[in-house]
Image (cartoon, helix red, strand yellow):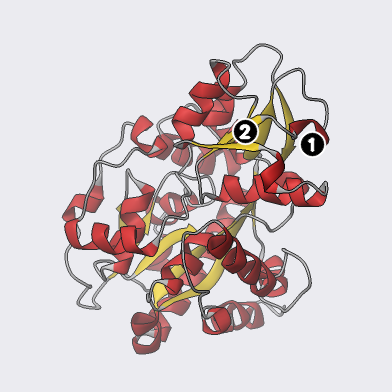
Amino acid sequence: MLRLRSTLSYCLLFVLSLTLVIGCTNPATFIKTKSDSQQATNVSNTNSIKLGFSAWPGWFPWQVTEDEGIFQKNNIDVDLKWFDGYLESISTLTAGQIDANSQTLGDTVNSTAGGADQVVVLVNDNSTGNDKVIVSKEIKSIQDLKGKKVAAEEGTVDHFLLLLGLKKAGISPKDIQFVPLETGKAAAAFVGGQVDAVAVFAPFTTQAFKRPGSKELFSSKDFPGAISDHLVLTRKFVEAYPEKVQAMVNSWFATVDYMKANQAKAYEIMAKRAGVSVKEYEEYANGTKIFTVEENLKAFQPGKDLTSLQFAAQEMNQFLVDVGLTKTKADVSKIFDDRFVKAYAATQGK
């Protein structure tokens, strides 16, 4: 079960941060787990760092970090907070009630456009197939989408993926009949034959494939770097406690090493957190690429495609304006801070 990766307007996030609305539709609610987020209070007293995470394979490793005592080994006290609703985790970080959160690049750019001061210090993963555009049996190519009804949740990374596919094929968004629906409803509409194609993420991909003859047209695997996930903190915390941020980054990479050496145990922990069997978890995990230290270093560098965070942020900036979720672009020149990854890499001789 994966997270609702919505790029919603900052106005909505701001309202949510004030009211702490919890009852949002979210695939994470399909996971029967205890929500620790209800215990959220104001920013930590710095004795511990409050870290939020929700249902996505690229973030489940944080549970391994905690369960295997890796935070303690790196001399940091982390209050790991599970959010049943991904949107709630974003609003809680925006409200300053946690110090760090696990969230997409798109949501970080959107929050910044709305006035939040957040910093990306680590790439957890890239989606490499868990986000898909699924079509009916009559559709053979992207060109066949012309004039067809295509559903997606407006402003989400899957909407972004859809537009990337159209652009690559030389098709204008105006050439399709876009049907904006919440992700779960979009999948249901596709299965019910109300639309011809749908852009969704797992586990809603599984639901969409229940339509007889349906198939994948393209996925996030075809657009490396388009959908990236990160450790994001408030700038205030980063500037005040850089040593704690470094310890968090060190803990993450130690966790990645642990998972490689103890895959069975790690999968058991992550599957339990997700509320699924190990076999089911493995199927979702295969569509997520956990980044190495070297891949992190490369991602932070300037580039001319989506594998560069700086380039991807600018593309997401334009996307948010184009779909009307923000009127002005965010200043993304200061949201990336790779010094912690670099410092860790130096200790490893990389």
Identify residue for label 1.
142
Give me the disc on residue 150: 2
Q: Residue at x 71, y 51 (%)?
A: 164
Q: Quadrant of residue 12?
A: bottom left
Which residue type does callout 2 highlight?
Val
* In this view, 265 is above or below 230: above
Q: Quadrant of residue 174?
A: top right
- 141 vs 170, nearest the viewer: 170
247 displayed left or right of 209 = left
257 displayed left or right of 244 = right
- 209 vs 173, nearest the viewer: 173
* In this view, 37 is above or below 123: above
Label 1: element kind? helix
Residue 49 drawn at (x, y percent): 30, 70
Residue 16 drawn at (x, y percent): 25, 57
Question: Quick one: label 1, few (<14), some, or many (20+) residues within 10 Å?
Answer: some
Q: Residue at x 51, y 73 (%)?
A: 120
